[in-house]
Image: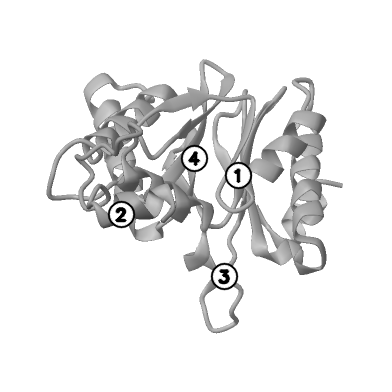
Amino acid sequence: MPMDMQHQAMGYDRTATMFSPEGTILQVEYAEKAVRLGSASIGMVCSDGVFILADKRIKDKLVIELSTNKIYEIDSHIISSIAGVVSDARILIEKAQVLSQQHRITYDSPIEPELVIKEISNIKQQFTQYGGARPFGASLMVAGIRDKKPELYTSTITGNYFSYYANAIGENDEKIKEKLREKYKQELNLKKGGKIALEIFKEIYGKNFDVDRFELVYIKNEEGNLKRLIKDELEEFIK
């Protein structure tokens, strides 16, 4: 019997508070698999701002298009995309939005993107340590502007977070990251970066690629306010 099946039979995957003999938490590993089943997003720090390009995946003429957004506004200068169990991620997004509002009321200033991702990561870590609950089955990518400089962060299932120049979450994330390592340059502007990100998706999806499935939200360094692009607006932006 394979080792992972032995561990399941022995009950190491029945709670998020139990380590396997290899020092892993199996419920966390299962949650990571759920993230890789989610729709993909690419985030990129550019010379003039930061953007996230996300595959909305849902394309049904019966569904109202605005309800399928995969990139959320945390504050006017911070955005976030999700991969994994959307209902799990929604809870974290709402906590991030409330945190941002509380910061503005308390300090009369916009919150820093790192404070948002740190708080979300702390919440996710708690659900890998205490009994009676499972880990959040979602990864969050947070992009924003701090002191007119772009920042990009990603929070993992375990509650860790890292800062990136460019990153991907969701389906085919490893393949996308390999292409980002080849094509990303720090001097890219938003238009060139967005074009590269869309080209990567086109390479990955092949004949299944459809630009109408994607949305791009960017924030410029100087303006500090988000702008959402879909369909014709997106194609016009990357020309």
Of callouts 1 and 3, the N-terminal one: 3
Q: What is the three-letter code of the residue carrying label 2?
A: Gln
Q: Secondary structure at mark 1?
A: strand
Where on the picture, by quarter, is residue 140? top left
Which residue is identified by label 4? 79
Q: Residue furthest bottom?
A: 62
Location of residue 197 (image quadrant): top right
Quadrant that contains the N terminus = bottom left
Mark sitting earlier along the chain (4/2): 2
Does residue 157 lie above or below 56 as drawn? Answer: above
**Residue placed at 81% from the left, 62% from the top?**
206
Percent across and percent down for residue 89 are 37, 51
Q: Horizontal and vertical percent for residue 116?
A: 36, 30
Q: Is residue 197 above or below residue 232?
A: above
Give the residue drawn at x 20%, y 48%: 15
SS at mark 2 in the image: helix
Whether label 3 touches label 2, CB < 8 Å: no
Q: Nearer the viewer, residue 103 or 188?
A: 188
Marks 1 & 3, CB-CB < 8 Å contact:
no
User: Could you say which disc has been placed on residue 58 in the image?
Assistant: 3
Distance between the Cα atoms at labels 4 and 2? Answer: 38 Å
Q: In the figure, 159 relative to 1: above or below?
A: above
Left or right placement of residue 142 versus residue 207 in this view: left
Read off the residue under disc 1.
227
For the residues marked 3 and 2, what is the alpha-carbon distance in whole angstroms?
34 Å
In the rendered structure, are the residues bearing label 1 and label 2 in contact, judged by CB atoms less than 8 Å apart? no
SS of the residue under disc 4: strand
